[in-house]
Amino acid sequence: MSRFERMRGRLRRAYESGRESARARRPDPDRSAEESGLASPSAPGPAAPPTATVVGAEPAPVHASTTSQDDVEVPHALRIAAAWCWRLIVVGIVTWSLLKIVGTIRIVIIPLAVALLLSALLAPAVGWLLRARLPRSLATGVVLVGGLAAVIGTLTLVVNEFIQGVPKLSEKSSQGVRQIQDWLKTGPLHLSDGQLNRYIDEAQSWINGNTEKFTSGALNTAATLAEVLTGTVLVLFATFFFLRDGSKIWRFLVRLLPVNARWKVDDAGRASWSTLGAYVRATVLVAFIDAVGIGIFLVIFDIPFAFPLAALVFLGAFIPIVGAFLSGVVAVLVALVDSGPVTALVILGVVIGVQQVEGHVLQPLIMGRAVAIHPLAVIIGIAAGVVLAGIAGALVAVPLIAVLNTAVRRLAARTVPDTPPDAVVVASHAP
């Protein structure tokens, strides 16, 4: 065999070997159809699964918020409304449960809230004594005893003046009743003696018919007095421990939370405490200015019970918007009985003027933007507080709203709280 023929044989064998290897690497359509589960003309297999993509057919529309094909048939707006509705239902149920719990244990909740208000008011005085190197327990006791002495002294003065002025006011009241009777006879109504006597008899009959209600009210008042005494003792003890161990109590509560939420909640809590302190101190200052302003005019016009009425205005000013005005109305009624309608109108003008100065000058200037609350929120809060806990609820409603306002704003802020100065940061290093 010549060399040329040997070379041609080698080339042919190499060509056939390459063809065989290329055929081996080429995919078999029947085998791939079996492995993929699809049917083919030569190897009919199972039908395509429901989730398979069929070439030539449009895919079913699926929204990102749906989890099944049935949800696609529901309009998007209806799905959003339903999601909002069930979440609001859950929030409403939780809120209703919390209100029921608060209403059940209000005899404990209200004294603790009052103790917090007193602690926010007296905390600066305790801080001054601590800076004077007094032990914390002694400083707290001195401030608490001093506050009790001031309250008891004020109540003593009010009761003494009231006892001294009752006979004179009773005489003035009798004269005022006679003047009213004369006005009913000679005024535009022209009532006769028979008509007056009939109205008086009807009033007397109404009082006699409701004696049982008055008696049950007195029993309720006795029960309320026992609750007030119990609450007063709880307020004293809670105020003492809040002033002495407030920081420790707060740190204990913060440690109960997850680690990632501690700094955020601690920052919101400290900001809320600052807001509460600013609110209480500003309210006390505004109430004092209201009481002094109205009291001066009561003294000038020689109205009886000037000091007790001023004290009533001071206490009423702790209920924003309505408290000082209602207490001022009592002063107007006393002026009407004692000095006549002209003086009563003057005192009414003084009360309205003081309220205007308070609302447009004192509140924005003293409280500032830190505790600024919309008047509608104040009115709703006071109404809800009265429904839930009476006068005590009206007292704590507005500061509670102020604290919650600050806490929610801090928690909703996207800024990271500052690292506490005493915090220890531990860094991990790779070995």
Image (tube, grey):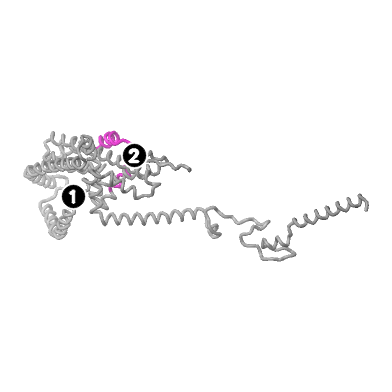
Mark 2 Cα-neighbour bin, 10 Å: few <14, some 14–19, many ≥20: few
Residue occupying the point 53% across, 56% down: 66
In the image, which is nearer the foreground, mark 1 or mark 2? 2
Q: Is residue 272 magenta?
A: no
Relative to residue 283, is residue 32 depicted above or below? below
**Label number found at residue 32:** none
Amino acid type for the residue under numbered disc 1:
Thr
Q: Determine the image quadrant of residue 96.
A: bottom left
Percent x, y for residue 166?
8, 44
Cα distance in 3D space between marks 1 and 2: 37 Å
Q: Which residues are magenta?
A: 354-382
Please tell me whether mark 1 sits on a helix, a strand or a loop: helix
Residue drawn where x is 30% and y is 46% of the image: 250
Q: Quadrant of residue 86?
A: bottom left
Residue at 88 percent across and 53 percent down: it is 9
In the image, 394 versus 172, the foreground residue is 394
Three-letter residue code for mark 2: Asp
Left or right side of 218 for 27:
right
Residue 150, given in percent of the width and then of the height, sits at 15, 40
Whether residue 349 is visible: no
> Where does residue 158 sit, x and y in percent of width and height?
12, 42
Tell me if mark 1 has few (under 14), some (14-19) or many (20+) residues whose alpha carbon lies within 10 angstroms of its own: some
The residue where tag 1 is placed is: 232
Judge whether residue 374 is colored magenta.
yes
Q: Is residue 154 visible?
A: yes
- Magenta stretch mostly in which secondary structure? helix
* Residues tagged 1 and 2 counted as in contact (Cβ below 8 A): no
Which structural element holds mark 2? loop
Query: Which comes before the other along the chain, label 1 or label 2?
Result: 1
**181 and 357: which one is in front?**
357
What residue is shown with label 2? 422
